[in-house]
Image (spheres, rainbow, N blue to C red):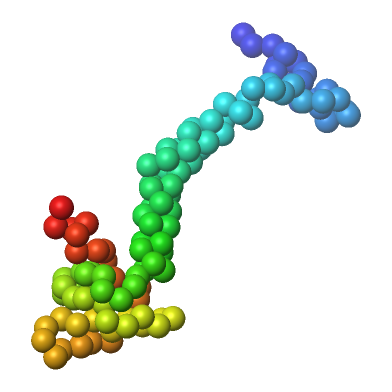
Amino acid sequence: MTDWTELIGPATAYAQGGTAPTGGGAFLTSFAPFIVIFVLFWVLLIRPQQKRQKEHRSLVDNLKKGDKVITNGGMFGTVMAVSSETITLQVADNVKIKMLRSEIMGMQAEIDA
């Protein structure tokens, strides 16, 4: 038979102003899986995406007249003019289109290689 005073002894001591028994490693042990999951997400998902965004921003910022590019829609063209938000592409003889700079996917030489 269980002695109930053994079970309620720590509870009554805590209620009377004592401290509850705590484990110092319990906090870290309970949050360790969350920390590991966050680190994995950072390494596998967040950091590579940030790197791609930085490379794309650099590509778009460094566009100049004469660059051969590919748009997100798959259209090949040559940059004819560059402004702050838009570029003008020549896609065929006497056919020029104006589009947002952010719609450039990459340089033609990078894709063909």
Whether residue 42 is situated above or below residue 63 in the rendered picture: above
Q: Position of residue 111 (x, y in %)?
A: 18, 58
Relative placement, left or right, of 99 versus 57 is left
Q: Give the residue displayed 39% in from the left and 67% down from the top.
A: 62
How many numbered badges does the structure rendering display?
A: 0
Identify the residue at the far left of this view.
Answer: 93
Where the N terminus falls, by quadrant?
A: top right
Q: Nearer the viewer, residue 44 or 60?
A: 60
Q: Give the residue displayed 88% in from the left and 29% down from the top.
A: 17
Q: Give the residue displayed 53% in from the left and 30% down from the top.
A: 32
Which of the 4 image quadrants contains residue 7?
top right
Identify the residue at the far front of this view.
Answer: 66
Whether residue 21 is situated above or below residue 31 in the rendered picture: above
Whether residue 28 is situated above or below residue 81 in the rendered picture: above
Which of the 4 image quadrants contains residue 106?
bottom left
Q: Position of residue 50 (x, y in %)?
A: 43, 54
**Residue 53 in sight here:** no
